[in-house]
Image: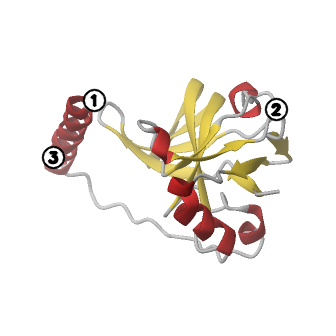
Amino acid sequence: DNSIEVIWTTGATVRRVSWMDGEFDEELVVSRNAIRLDRLNSGAPFLDSHGMWSLSNVIGSVLRGSAKIEGSIGTARVRLSGAPDAADRVAKIKEGTVSNISVGYRIHAVERKERDGAIPLHRVTDWEPWEISAVTVPADAGAQVRSAGKDADLFDCRVVRAPADHSDLDALRISMRRRIYEVARRG
């Protein structure tokens, strides 16, 4: 029926950087109380790499009413596009070459927790998925096309933090401001 089942979140903790907050770990709370599923269940788009600025990036859509929370994961059924301009990307998904998934979302509430000697934790306790994307590298390693996700090789990564160097942080802020300016300028 030209559809696939996807895992769009496992609530994995992901390292983020904000020009206002610096580095922090972000954890998406996965529960029926924390996630607003209305947009997904209304037929949200399935995009190529979060490309929201062109209809050519739409390679499918979430089947209405299919998004749900199963234990600690979010799943949905996605109908893939049959349009000629999406054929190459859809073919890669069907053959399993592209199996990584990511979710675009809006945060409504977050609990910020300072951790003694560690990077702060931001627990997102109220959030709203806007779209699901096929991506090259997902932030959440467990977010996969369902058939690929069950057998995917996942690995742990140890992060060693170097001593704080404010010049690096200042350079990061400048770089992020330039990127924001460039995106805004392109419209």
Please report the residue visible at 66 percent of the width from the left and 57 percent of the height from the top: 143
Placement of 174 over or under 48, stated as above or below: above
Crowd rating for badge 1 (residues with CA inside 10 Å; few <14, some 14–19, many 20+):
few
Name the residue tied to disc 2. 32
Crowd rating for badge 3 (residues with CA inside 10 Å; few <14, some 14–19, many 20+):
few
Query: For the residues marked 3 and 2, what is the alpha-carbon distance in whole angstroms?
Result: 40 Å
In percent of width and height, residue 30 lies at 74, 40
Query: For the residues marked 3 and 1, what is the alpha-carbon distance in whole angstroms?
Result: 25 Å
In percent of width and height, residue 66 lies at 83, 40
Residue 139 in sight here: no
- Specify which label sits upstream in the sequence, 3 or 2: 2
Q: Quadrant of the N terminus?
A: bottom right
* Left/right of residue 49 with respect to residue 37 in the rendered view: left
* Left/right of residue 151 with respect to residue 114 in the rendered view: right
Please report the residue visible at 25 percent of the width from the left and 52 percent of the height from the top: 164
Q: Secondary structure at mark 3?
A: helix
Residue 47 in sight here: yes
The circle on residue 187 is: 1
Question: Viewer-nearest of labels 3 and 1?
Answer: 1
* Left/right of residue 41 with respect to residue 95 in the rendered view: right
Task: Report if the CB atoms under discs 3 and 1 are less than 8 Å apart.
Answer: no
In percent of width and height, residue 50 lies at 48, 45
- Specify which label sits upstream in the sequence, 1 or 2: 2
- Specify which label sits upstream in the sequence, 3 or 1: 3
Most extreme residue toward the top, as rendered? 108
Amino acid beneath label 1: Gly
Please report the residue visible at 48 percent of the width from the left and 39 percent of the height from the top: 55
Placement of 55 over or under 111, stated as above or below: below
Placement of 25 over or under 137, stated as above or below: above
Name the residue tied to disc 3. 171
